[in-house]
Amino acid sequence: MSEQLICKNVTLGYEGSAVAEDLDFTISEGDYLCILGENGSGKSTLIKALLGLMPVMSGEILRDSVTAADGIGYLPQQTVVQRDFPASVREIVRSGCIKKCGLRPFYSKEEKALADTNMARLGISALAGRCYRELSGGQQQRVLLARALCATGRILLLDEPVTGLDPKAQAELYEIIGTLNKSGVTIIMVSHDIGAVRFASHILHIGNGKQLFYGTKDEYLSSRLGRSFIITEGGEAEDEPEAPAKTAAPEEKPMSSAAKAAIAAGAGAFVIGASASIHHYVKRGERNA
């Protein structure tokens, strides 16, 4: 399998203060990487770096030529405001093609067909004319997955995709993501849910701003760190820690408005801070249906 993304001894941070250090891992075509770690461990900062929204302090992030050109399809965590976005399913899915449009103020026949294909792929074709705000949480996540696939069908980065979903919807979404992975889509999933580990091929575990583990799922589950994580997250007695506690990493700074706009326009994010302009844009495209 060809390598799509390589992090080589990467340190990330803000204004000279490191948030995550010594990140060293490779993502190859067809991988299903699950990124684990406590809040404040550096996962959000790593997401920004992988999306190209912030530079590294040291080391380098290498992307193959296709990934560098197409980018990474991004499904961010949803807020209450985002769940209430007043647009149709078709409009939202098509908006994943905005980067492909460039300065063109309408969607091409091919882009509309791509949106239709991805809606069918996610089983939401019958919802195309429905208002997004009227859908269940699981249906909304399918819509956003279809949108991310319109941005690029090679690599998807999913940030806590099952948060807030009921167990049935979680299981269905995991199955859909697994099916996408089996079809050749590379998955990078950030999660606190131990259920996500079960579907992954590789695990990256970050703690206290450091890379604690990178390897296959089987290697992780047989390690003391992996066993401790599974037991702790499962609500049972905590296992012996693998290493002494370290000084907490500096608190991550909030994303700037410019970075949010960059995600919405270039990385396939669903950022409602730009809802007025996006809604106007997709409406223009809708008139060309």
Image: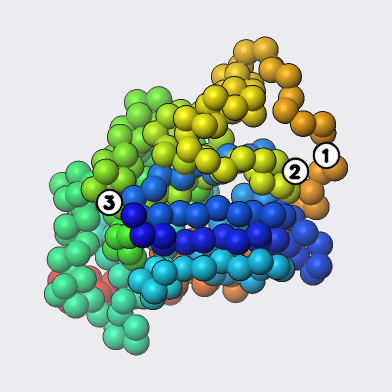
Quadrant in which the N terminus appears: bottom left
Q: Position of residue 70 (x, y in %)?
A: 37, 71
Q: Is residue 168 above or below residue 26?
A: above
Whole-number angstrom distance, CA of label 3 to CA of label 2:
33 Å
Q: Is residue 238 left or right of residue 149?
A: right
Q: Position of residue 185 (x, y in %)?
A: 31, 52
Q: Is residue 19 left or right of residue 31?
A: right
Element assignment for label 2: loop
Residue 146 appears in the figure: yes
Tell me which residue sits at (71%, 47%) in the image. Answer: 210
Disc number placed over residue 246 in the picture, else none: 1
**If you read the primary sequence from the N terminus, does the residue marked by circle 1 or circle 2 appear first?**
2
Q: Amino acid at mark 2?
A: Asn
Disc number placed over residue 208 in the picture, else none: 2
| Mark 3 neighbour class, 10 Å CA radius: few under 14, some 14 to 19, many 20 or more | some
* Mark 1 vs 2: CB contact within 8 A: yes
* Mark 3 vs 2: CB contact within 8 A: no
Q: Amino acid at mark 1?
A: Lys
Q: Position of residue 228 (x, y in %)?
A: 64, 23
**If you read the primary sequence from the N terminus, does the residue marked by circle 3 or circle 1 appear first?**
3
Residue lying furthest bottom in this view?
A: 103
Tell me which residue sits at (34%, 83%) in the image. Answer: 102
**If you read the primary sequence from the N terminus, does the residue marked by circle 3 or circle 2 appear first?**
3
Residue 124 appears in the figure: no
Q: Amino acid at mark 3?
A: Gly
Whole-number angstrom distance, CA of label 3 to CA of label 1:
39 Å
Q: Which residue is mark 3?
A: 184
